Amino acid sequence: MFLDKAKIYVKAGDGGDGIVSFRRELYVPEGGPAGGDGGKGADIIFRVDEGLRTLIDFRYQKHFKAPRGEKGKTKGMHGAGAEDMVVRVPPGTVIYDDDTHELIADLTRHGQEVVVAKGGRGGRGNIRFATARNPAPHLAEKGEEGQERWIVLELKVMADVGLVGFPSVGKSTLLSVVSAAEPKIGAYHFTTITPNLGVVDVGEGRSFVMADLPGLIEGAHEGVGLGHEFLRHVERTRLIVHVVDIAATEERDPYDDWLKINEELRLYNEKLAQRPQIVAANKMDMPGADEQLREFKAKLERDGHGDVEVFPISAMARKGVQELLYRAAVLLEQIPETPLVEEVVDTSERKVYRYEKEDDDTSFTIRRENDTFIVESVAIERMLKRMNTDSYDAFQRFSYTMRKSGIEAALRKKGAKDGHLVRIGDYEFEFVEQE
């Protein structure tokens, strides 16, 4: 089974909690706070493995949850950070955020990595909060939550040569006679519904990977037929071999077919119109093929396409195939091996996607709903999530932060009085005027 699209859920590890602890050792007067920080949660990393060819593993496992960091320890020792979770994907995997549809990464090289969900930071222990005014704080933070998201994986076949053309023009037959691949072949449309790969040995030490791609029809760029399920794979090929039924066995004009397929490629991605292409005029063993071939070449000349190379072949009879392969091998030597893709993301071996230093965001908004004031602030909401609500010291620190950030003064300007409710994220408080 070939699976080229999957939707999965990833959840990075939460950070470990910091702890409240004090040194109580013999002969150590005034030991003070000794609670260590929690360890960092595990990242979820996608790594390219050239041994994989499909996304079939993601059919059986759709949820990936990384381990959390350890809690802090006594004597000021940090908890251990969790080991990152590495998920293997095949070359040619493109990763999108399911909610925003933004491109996260385009993975093409063996060993290339991307962090798709970053683990949370460990909470600070009470040793971090000791000050001259409060030398023995009963205050520690919870670990930060790891990032979580739904992502979509799409596999674009990595092949040197891609066979394109209308259904039933002989693409699968051609692949079967030039390689050891065994694609399904039948006398009906859409025999090929998933890409088939084969290694072609041209001789003289030259070889390349050829892909038999599902047949195209008019309107494919809008999703008609197999549509985008096909076209995404064409983007990866370095050379296009356009197979046409030169004998018109389906009672279609071969030249008209050639024009329609090229138009579909152009409408899907303008860059595909500039991709090197040669034409394989297949089924030359059928009656009337010679006459159709002459007409085909004449129309190419008439419309200014005289530079298009046409190779008459019969895949079934294996005639003219070797000349086609030789020419493909020569052209591939002239084409860069860098994948010709629509979007190039980060070329580094490892990339962290959309991780921002949110601590710098101190902005806030306040709106009123009856007697409740709703405060929206990324920094304060994150602080509340990490705060131990049972700790007096923690609430003292929270009150100080509210005053320092200007939120308390802004609430008064909005009309907040004693007894009014203040909602921040999932928490509600009663507003109390300081004496």
Image: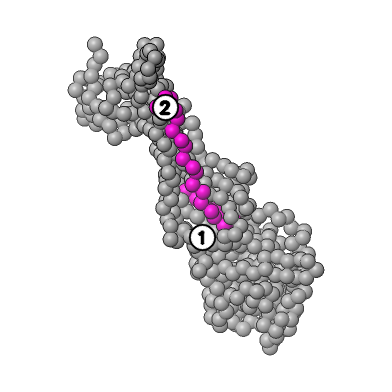
Q: Position of residue 176 (x, y in %)?
A: 64, 76
| Residue drawn 50% across the image and 37% down it | 355
- Residue 119 is covered by the magenta coloring: no
**Lower sequence index among marks 2 and 1:** 2
**Numbered range of the magenta stretch:** 74-99
How many numbered marks does the figure carry? 2
> Type of residue at label 1?
Leu
Name the residue at the right extreme: 204
Tell me the residue at 68%/62% (across/down): 160
Residue 249, position in %: x, y?
62, 83
Identity of the residue drawn at 60% across and 48% down: 112
Tag 1: Cα neighbours inside 10 Å, few (<14), some, or many (≥20)? many
Q: Residues within 10 Å of mark 2 (few under 14, many from 20)?
A: many
Magenta stretch: helix, strand or loop mostly = loop
Query: Is residue 86 inside the magenta stretch?
Result: yes
In the rendered image, the quadrant that contains the C terminus is top left
Image spot of residue 88 (x, y percent): 53, 53
Residue 406 is left or right of residue 47, and the answer is left
Which residue has dot 2 on it? 36
Q: Secondary structure at mark 1?
A: loop
Front position in the image: 73 or 423? 73
Q: Nearer the viewer, residue 431 or 145?
A: 145
Q: Is residue 308 above or below residue 154?
A: below
Q: Disc 2 and disc 1: Cα gap in Å? A: 42 Å
Q: Position of residue 40 (x, y in %)?
A: 46, 36
Instruction: Name the residue at the left extreme.
Output: 419
> Label 2 amino acid?
Gly
Pair 2/1: label in front? 2
* Residue indicated by mark 1: 55
Using the rendered view, name the quadrant where residue 171 is placed.
Answer: bottom right
Image height of 424 relative to 331, above or below: above
Res. 290 visible in picture: yes
